[in-house]
Amino acid sequence: MIANQELNDLPSGLDEISEFLLSKMKQDKEGFYWETISRDSKTEVLSFTFNPSLWNGTSGIAWFFLALYEHTKKEYDLETAEKTFSKVYSYSAHQTLLNPSLYDGISGIIYLGLELFRVTGKELYLQQTLNLYEMYRQKILAEQTEDMLIGISGILMMMVSLYHYTKDEKLGNDIEALVTTLLGKSLVAEAGIKWGNNLLSMDSLCGFSHGNSGIAFCLLQLGKYFENEEFIWLAEQAFRYEDLYYDPAQNNWMDLRWEESKNHLPNLFDWNKNTFLQEDFDLNAWAHGACGIGSARIQAFTITADPVYKEDCRKVFERCKHDIKTRSKRNHILFSGYGGLSDFMLQYSEVFDNKEASELATEITLESLQKSRSHGHSEWGIQNSEDLGLMTGTAGIGLSLLAIIKGKSLNSILHPELPISETGKNTVLKNFKVKKVFFERFYPKTLEILKTFNSIQESIYDSQTIEEFGNRLSEIIIGLPEEDMIYISDIHQLETVQINIRKRHKGALCFQTRLMILKKELEEFLKNDQTELLKKRFIRNPFIDGHETQWNWKEDHKKDSKAGTYNNIFYSTDQEMFHLLMEPFPAAVLQLLEKPLSIDELVECFQYSEGDREVMMEKVSEQLVELLKSFFIRMV
């Protein structure tokens, strides 16, 4: 039980932190600012400089003072936030070098300006945010990264908030354009839908900052604000994907980021969940792991009331409770420490009326105050040096204290929520056909040909999965005249095969690592005598797939062209899936090597004249060497 004396200490602790931050504040003719810690990306040298961002810069500290003003109603807290925004606005308007992101770029600065407008009602802030948006508009619309921290999902939170207050028609069109970009980058997965090119990860990331939960959180908000259930469906598909990487033993979702140490894992070529589970980082924080995922699942439960999400939230509560009780984390900051866990616990307490969650949040936040006092409210963060930032240091500790004092999680940068929309008045994305746009990407040729026979009913797009959609297309095809049915079934089956290949694809790093292993193996093999081939078995590589069709779908052809036999081979690289047409003999070898076979075993699969075994042995051997050198197959 937490003593009243300890609780009474929270307001004085909050005062200490605000006074400490004010003591570090600087001023010039443009307004207030702070010099916050920064690391040079080239030299790795730490320095203190003006940084306008929400993440660990001046805007983040202004966010704290604005939240403080809403609680205290002290004019100086508001003045601090306003004069800070004056400085940040002036800098951003004259230095159009900022990136578009919410947490570390111009979208975060615009978002702060919108919060000032919400609190003060001053039209100046609305005009300034529109000015900044227009200055950075092209850069914002060109963004290709999908996530919440630095990508489209976070940017959309700003854009919809700006649209809410302005109802600017051009902004509405921009929102639709960026949503279209986000949807166009979605990928089919072994379950659900995912985002992420995986240049530095084992598969698309789980989690809030860079992972699929952050994207899902944005989609849930869009669905709720624009009253479009299909965005909520899309968010739920991202949760289905993330659950592939849930680890019951740790009660956590895996951290799929890459580290060099993983290069030495056994069975690395297999590249599956079990490969990496043994060395999972098991992080639980706002940025990665259960805590941030929990924020997204709480949002899902409040919107859908689905008991599945209630159970997910309970799991996250238990994991956060364990980490608080065992004091397993190194710091109390928001993005990687107990500050993020405290925020989740407050959300959980509110939504599920759980007193224990509130008590645990209070307990760990009181500890953060004591830790903060022990080093003069200064040394925070992963650098163990002065860090005044919101997500990384002192301002974030202050925000945690404020949330406990208020007794509820703030609408903060940890889980930004869109304003409440007026029912029926926001039509920008209300009729956006999410499912239609998604499903049509994967059956383009099938749909193109089907539409020449009869009109496609819109109801077929009301499918819950890509598998269900494919089955609905199949049902339509079966009802066609036999000749047409055979023709369209041929491309439908081919596109279904391509979908299944894409589901298994784990991204760029997976392919590059496998290729590196194969190159080393080939180099060793070429040093040996070719007779070594006879001792080996061979198997088709996991990024090689084959499918036989009756028509040549790689090239344009007329519907009435003659049916034949075409051996389609798909070679999935780090960049794209190449579609090749292969001669019958190598295609047959590849098909047979779905399971490991030796040269002798392969030869027995072919017909040859009596006395021609040696000729066939040589032919098979030559073909295997060619396939090895092209990385179609591997020795095992």
Image (cartoon, rainbow, N blue to C red):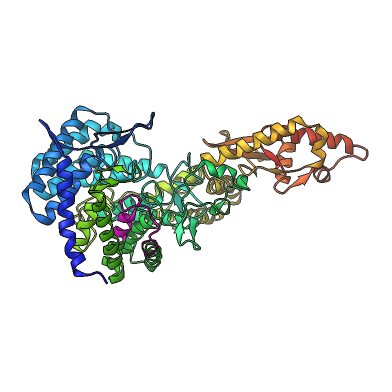
Q: Is residue 503 magenta?
A: no
Residue 254 rendering spot, x and y as whole percentages: 47, 54
Q: Report the residue that reaches farthest toward the right.
A: 611
Q: Report the residue that reaches farthest toward the front.
A: 374
Q: Which residues are magenta?
A: 323-344
The mark total stands at 0
Nearer the observer, 171 or 301:
301
Residue 376 rendering spot, x and y as whole percentages: 23, 48
* Viewer can see residue 552: no
Instruction: In the rendered view, tell whether residue 283 sits above or below residue 35.
Output: below
Nearer the observer, 342 or 193:
342
Residue 90 rendering spot, x and y as whole percentages: 16, 31
* Viewer can see residue 363: yes
Nearer the observer, 189 or 488:
189
Q: Residue at x 79, y 37 (%)?
A: 533
Q: Is residue 328 magenta?
A: yes
- Check the picture and name the quadrant holding the C terminus: top right
- Check the picture and name the quadrant holding the N terminus: bottom left
Left or right: residue 472 compared with residue 605: left
Instruction: In the rendered view, tell whether residue 70 sits above or below residue 512.
Output: below
Question: Quadrant location of residue 224?
Answer: bottom left
Residue 406 rendering spot, x and y as whole percentages: 18, 61
Question: Quadrant location of residue 27?
Answer: top left
